[in-house]
Amino acid sequence: MKIVYSFLVFTLFLWACSGGNKKNETQENQNMFTGAKGEVKLMTLDPGHFHAALVQKTMYDQVDPVVHIYAPEGNELKAHMKLIDNYNNRSDNPTSWQTKTYTGKDFFEKMLAEKPGNVMITAGNNARKTEYILKTISAGINVLADKPMVISPAEFPKLEQAFQVAEEKGVMLYDIMTERYEITTMIQRELSMIQEVFGSLQKGTEEEPAITKESVHHFFKYVSGSPLIRPAWFFDVQQQGEGIVDVTTHLVDMIQWEAFPEVTLKKEDVEIISASRWTTDLTPEMFETATQLKEYPDYLQKDVDQGLLKVYSNGEINYTLKGIHAKVSVIWNFQAPEGAGDTHYSIMRGSLCNLVIRQGEEQDYKPTLYVEAGEGVDPSAFEEKLKKAVEQDLAAFYPGLQLISSENNWIIEIPAKYKVGHEAHFGQVTEKYLDFLVQGKMPEWEVPNIIVKYHTIMEGMKRAMK
């Protein structure tokens, strides 16, 4: 009996130590990364968007140079491989990626069955993205996803489930929020947290929100020096998603990140006031320039009216977040003016000043951060505090910042070394994600706020559709 009893005790001890409960299993998975060279093994799923390649524009010591790609045959895969090849063969700091590709129709199922990697990158057709994310997470694979992770309100519960399963499995699901690494936005956020300069964020109104983010994008543009060829499905809102659920992902994220830094938000903190959506109309010639296709495919015929392709790529959401009025809007034009590109406008209204980012012709289409003293604020006394904040406090972290006076407002002059560009931000996000993997966790507010972000966008879409 003593032998049997000892055996049972020993068995129970082994069961507990080996992850016999979900908590221990989760902890084991979370600690699987140490930062060792090559321990992160990437799998890229159906890279139909150039953002997938931008993750690989730089090398990372922690990431194995062999990347497994699972995708259908076609021009999108060829375009992805061409970008990777360009990075490998450029003269300045070339990369050394190696690829192993599977192109069968069962590419997704094959990836889950073979599972040669521990992190999946997804950036492409969004029609099944939420499903792919949930199934990949359920298989115990970490996911770094391009935005948006969901494009329709009906799919939103799957995304919430994916985060729940990720917690249970001890894996990480994260979306690529590049705009957090744009330097003017970073300095805008930093200044808003200096009470002597900014005061407190105003409550605002629907007509004059406390915080506004507006973004203008273009269907035809250049990426890594070459014309971007869009896949035809990019113009199908059932596959790409409407503008109100796509680019607004960044805008809503920045509002949460700036207005409530490191505060854990809840869905109940959001109230949609109004929302709208409208089309960008493309001629057949524009469509051919962007896609190199002479005809609209059958699945786009539903959006064609008298020869024009009408794409619901524009949208606006007015809402409150914890009682603060906010507005996001996105516009897609066909092509930017000469010398211009995608542009961004942002304003944060404080009790002492407004922090404004402009990127128009006057700014040579480069994002520029302005500080505008509030009504009743003494400019001389304010400038003294602002100068200290910029050239001493913030310059300790961002050396070289300078304050330039311009009538009743000021410009924050930011050295060129911080203006690395949109494409480089993908590497910065990836490095942050790799750091999360080593830590075995993300900040406590990250996942709840990602859920709130997509909840806001989905509720905005539902309002706009009414």
Image (cartoon, helix red, strand yellow):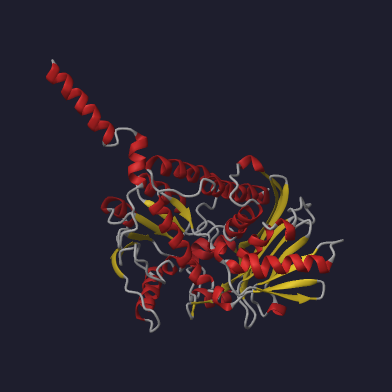
**Residue 313 location, x and y as percent?**
61, 62
* Quadrant in which residue 1 is drawn: top left
**Residue 256 location, x and y as percent?**
62, 52
Q: Furthest residue to the top?
A: 1
- Give the camera-side residue of 157 and 286: 157
- Give the camera-side residue of 132 and 449: 449
**Residue 6 location, x and y as percent?**
17, 22
75 over 278 or under it: above or below: below
- Give the camera-side residue of 108 and 69: 69
Taking the spot 36% from the left edge, 42% from the top edge, the residue there is 27
**Residue 252 location, x and y as percent?**
62, 55
Residue 306 in view = no
* Quadrant in which residue 352 is drawn: bottom right
Q: How many discs appear?
A: 0
Taking the spot 81% from the left edge, 66% from the top edge, the residue there is 381
- Give the camera-side residue of 141 and 241: 141
Taking the spot 47% from the left edge, 68% from the top edge, the residue there is 231
Residue 164 in view = yes
* Quadrant in which residue 448 is drawn: top right
User: Could you tell whether 178 is left or right of 119 in the image?
Assistant: right
User: Could you tell whether 37 is left or right of 325 in the image?
Assistant: left
User: Could you tell whether 29 is left or right of 268 in the image?
Assistant: left
User: Could you tell whether 375 is left or right of 303 in the image?
Assistant: right
